[in-house]
Image (cartoon, rainbow, N blue to C red):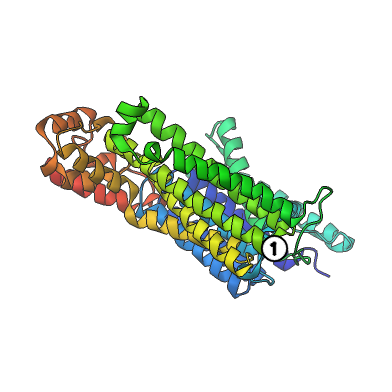
């Protein structure tokens, strides 16, 4: 019997290498290193877990999202993509040994997510290979051989080092660690945590999934379908009254905000947007809760729930319009653009809910939500949020009614530089002076290209350097 299981040792070494690579990548600007790290992690997962096609598709989708780390430079966009990639990788691991995401219900998804936390101890044990202590003679021989090698190398090393000072400095250089203790601990913690996270993913992918529950849920105070219908009917009446009596305020635009309601743009857009989106999410949660409680088989319940979802769509249209009014007054930002994307995603999900109510089958909704979220994120990546914000805000300022927010544009990432340089013909002299004052255009290309290692190579920063250089020349 071998002293150490060879496969476990190889896996531990791979995990350690991933941890060391993650530590290096985290301490440098985002670049191609993130994609290469994800590619290496995917290779380890495929090699040691051998996931099935559905799992490979989910993991591959997550890997594709990591390419944004070297195609774009916007920190919020990169963060969203990396978080989504991690979620898809974990989801893919949960289906590695079987199951179809399209036919998996919402409760099963929740349970799979909770079970992922139970794989953490297995991930720790995967990182530390199990030693076969039953082979006592082999352990003793290994210890004895290691001690003898250490003694022999020390004796001969000291002799050769005393004979040649250059050789002495060479062999003792690795022993002189200039890294302060706090930084050394930080690197150690990051390396270990990254290795354990990768090990947890592999362990979860190799774990058999127990049977997951389906169907309705028995609760201590379970309501009858007609009772759930009455509850939803009351909410429908409330939403209908809200839409009817507030219709001029919901869709009145600038004049309603400033003249009739007496609110500021900020009060009108921010409070209305947040409350309407939260109300929509809560109604979806209420419908889902009632569905799991067994009301989904009742046709009256489904009709009333469909009416509520339709009213939710109207409310989302109003929230979208409120945000548009705010942007027309103050311009686009990351949060406002992401708010638009959230509303569109929710609206499409509501349409999917209506379809599921019509066919009395909602098992496909969780996967639809995940797929639509990935599509929305891919759309954001293609649009390039920073460039989109520059173009829309320059167009808004070109009307002469609003000044250009030069401070905010100067705070954007390198993704904005090419669009900003290309839009200079539309910028007024005053706005151009503000941009130059904020340093958005006078910065040299060294602001985007620095001495970082190759793992930080980023195409967006390279393009920004060229755009700024062409402007300066």
* Front residue of 465 and 109: 109
Q: Is residue 341 above or below residue 43?
A: above
Quarter of the figure with residue 324 = top left
Residue furthest out toward the top = 262
Q: Which residue is the site of mark 1? A: 298
Say few, some or many: other residues with alpha carbon within 10 Å of mark 1 (under 14 / 14 to 19 / 20 or more): some
Q: Position of residue 16 (x, y in %)?
A: 62, 54
Quadrant in which the N terminus is drawn: bottom right
Looking at the image, residue 208 sits to the left or right of residue 400; the answer is right
Q: Is residue 174 above or below residue 146?
A: above
Q: Position of residue 184 (x, y in %)?
A: 58, 36
Q: Position of residue 171 (x, y in %)?
A: 55, 46
Q: Give the residue displayed 40% in from the left and 47% down from the top.
A: 340
Q: Give the residue displayed 38% in from the left and 57% down from the top.
A: 379
* Front residue of 161 and 328: 328
Looking at the image, residue 357 sits to the left or right of residue 342; the answer is right
* Front residue of 414 and 307: 307
Q: Give the residue displayed 51% in from the left and 57% down from the top.
A: 349
Q: Give the residue displayed 61% in from the left and 65% down from the top.
A: 45
Quarter of the figure with residue 247 = top left
* Front residue of 268 and 471: 268
Label 1's element?
loop
Q: Position of residue 346 (x, y in %)?
A: 49, 52
In this view of the protein, can residue 81 be seen by the observer? yes
Looking at the image, residue 418 sits to the left or right of residue 202; the answer is left
Q: How many marks on residues?
A: 1
In this view of the protein, can residue 165 be seen by the observer? no
Quadrant in which the C terminus is drawn: top left
């Amino acid at each position: 019997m071998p002293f150490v299981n060879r496969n476990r040792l190889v896996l531990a070494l791979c995990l350690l290498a991933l941890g060391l690579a993650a530590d290096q990548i985290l301490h440098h600007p985002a670049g191609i290193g993130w994609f290469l790290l994800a590619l290496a992690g995917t290779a380890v997962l495929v090699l040691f877990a051998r996931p099935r096609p559905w799992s490979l598709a989910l993991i591959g989708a997550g890997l594709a999202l990591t390419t944004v780390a070297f195609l774009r430079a916007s920190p919020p966009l990169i963060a969203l993509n990396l978080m989504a990639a991690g979620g898809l990788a974990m989801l893919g691991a949960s289906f590695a040994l079987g199951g179809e995401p399209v036919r998996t219900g919402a409760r099963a998804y929740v349970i799979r997510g909770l079970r992922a936390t139970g794989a953490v101890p297995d991930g720790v044990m995967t990182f530390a290979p199990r030693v076969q202590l039953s082979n006592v003679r082999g352990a003793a021989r290994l210890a004895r051989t290691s001690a003898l090698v250490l003694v022999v190398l020390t004796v001969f090393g000291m002799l050769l080092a005393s004979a040649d000072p250059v050789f002495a400095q060479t062999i003792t250089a690795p022993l002189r660690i200039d890294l302060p203790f706090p930084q050394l601990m930080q690197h150690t913690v990051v390396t270990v945590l990254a290795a354990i996270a990768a090990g947890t993913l592999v362990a979860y992918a190799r774990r058999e999934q127990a049977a997951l529950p389906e169907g309705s849920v028995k609760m201590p105070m379970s309501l009858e379908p007609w009772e759930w219908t009455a509850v939803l009917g009351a909410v429908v009446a409330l939403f209908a009254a809200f839409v009817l009596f507030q219709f001029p305020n919901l869709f009145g635009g600038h004049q309603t905000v400033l003249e009739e309601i007496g609110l500021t743009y900020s009060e009108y857009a921010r409070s209305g947007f947040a409350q309407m989106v939260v109300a929509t999410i809560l109604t979806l949660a209420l419908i889902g809760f009632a569905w799991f409680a067994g009301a989904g088989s009742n046709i009256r319940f489904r009709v009333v729930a469909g009416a509520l979802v339709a009213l939710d769509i109207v409310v989302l249209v109003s929230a979208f319009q409120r945000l548009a009014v705010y942007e027309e007054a103050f311009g686009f930002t990351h949060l406002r653009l992401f708010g638009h994307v959230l509303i569109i995603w929710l609206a499409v999900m509501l349409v999917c809910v209506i379809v599921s109510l019509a066919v009395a089958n909602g098992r496909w909704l969780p996967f639809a939500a995940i797929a639509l979220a990935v599509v929305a994120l891919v759309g954001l990546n293609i649009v390039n949020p920073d460039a989109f914000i520059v173009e829309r805000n320059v167009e808004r300022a070109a009307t002469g009614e609003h000044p250009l927010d030069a401070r905010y544009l100067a705070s954007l990432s390198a993704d904005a530089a090419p669009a900003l340089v290309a839009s200079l013909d539309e910028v007024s002299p005053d706005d151009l002076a503000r941009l130059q004052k904020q340093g958005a255009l006078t910065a040299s290309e060294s602001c985007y290209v620095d001495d970082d290692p190759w793992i930080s190579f980023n195409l967006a920063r390279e393009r920004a350097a060229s755009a700024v250089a062409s402007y300066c020349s």
